[in-house]
Image (tube, helix red, strand yellow):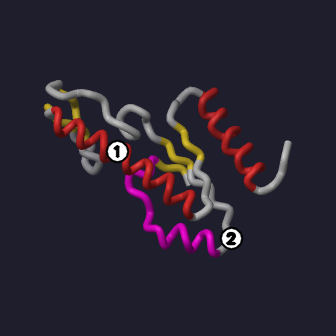
Amino acid sequence: VLSDFLVSPPEDVWIQAVERRWDVVPVVIQDPIWEQSFPDVAGVVVPIADPRSGKTSLARLGAREVAERRLANEQRRERLVDGFRGLDLEPVLVSSAALEAILAAFLSWSEQRLNWRGHAW
């Protein structure tokens, strides 16, 4: 399942997949600056796109709004990863568009999975 998981499917969907013994692999694709955290753009005018309409507008965020957004993004990612691991679903974490980094994320996941299932290299 490839997604940014900014809005994740309900937990019961994941539970049903696990109970059916499907081999579900969540691939979390999130930008490390804007989705995993949030940059210090306090006082800077930034373009904001409405995800439904695609319309762009300008916004100026204050220091408190930036800190709140950063904390919310970091907590969302932590809850997401912890939730997957709680269901024994180890996610692949992709945070770069570089081919080498994507390959490294999948290879790392694969090695962890082999070790988790009791297989050694």
Give the side of residue 116 with respect to residue 96, left or right: right
Where residue 32 appears, x then y in whole percent?
A: 43, 34
Q: Amino acid at mark 2?
A: Arg
* Image depth: mark 2 or mark 1 in front: 1
* Residue in view at x 60 percent, y 29 percent: 101
Read off the residue under disc 2: 21
Where residue 17 appears, x then y in whole percent?
A: 59, 70
Evaluate whether residue 59 shows in this view: no
- 51 versus 83 height, above or below: above
Read off the residue under disc 1: 73
Where residue 111 appears, x then y in whole percent?
A: 74, 43
Q: Nearer the viewer, residue 45 or 88?
A: 88
Q: Is residue 91 magenta?
A: no
Q: For residue 47, which numbered disc appears in the image?
A: none
- Which secondary structure, mark 2? loop
Mark 2 closeness class: few <14, some 14–19, many ≥20 residues within 10 Å? few
The quadrant of the picture occupied by the C terminus is top right
Q: Quadrant of residue 48?
A: top left
* Residue in view at x 25 percent, y 39 percent: 49
Q: Amino acid at mark 1?
A: Asn
C-alpha span from label 2 to label 1: 31 Å
Give the side of residue 29 with respect to residue 103, left or right: left
Where residue 42 appears, x then y in whole percent?
A: 18, 28
- 77 versus 36 height, above or below: below
Mark 1 closeness class: few <14, some 14–19, many ≥20 residues within 10 Å? some
| Mark closer to the chain start, 2 or 1 | 2
The quadrant of the picture occupied by the N terminus is bottom right
The residues colored magenta run 4-19
Evaluate whether residue 86 shows in this view: yes
* Residue in view at x 44 percent, y 49 percent: 78
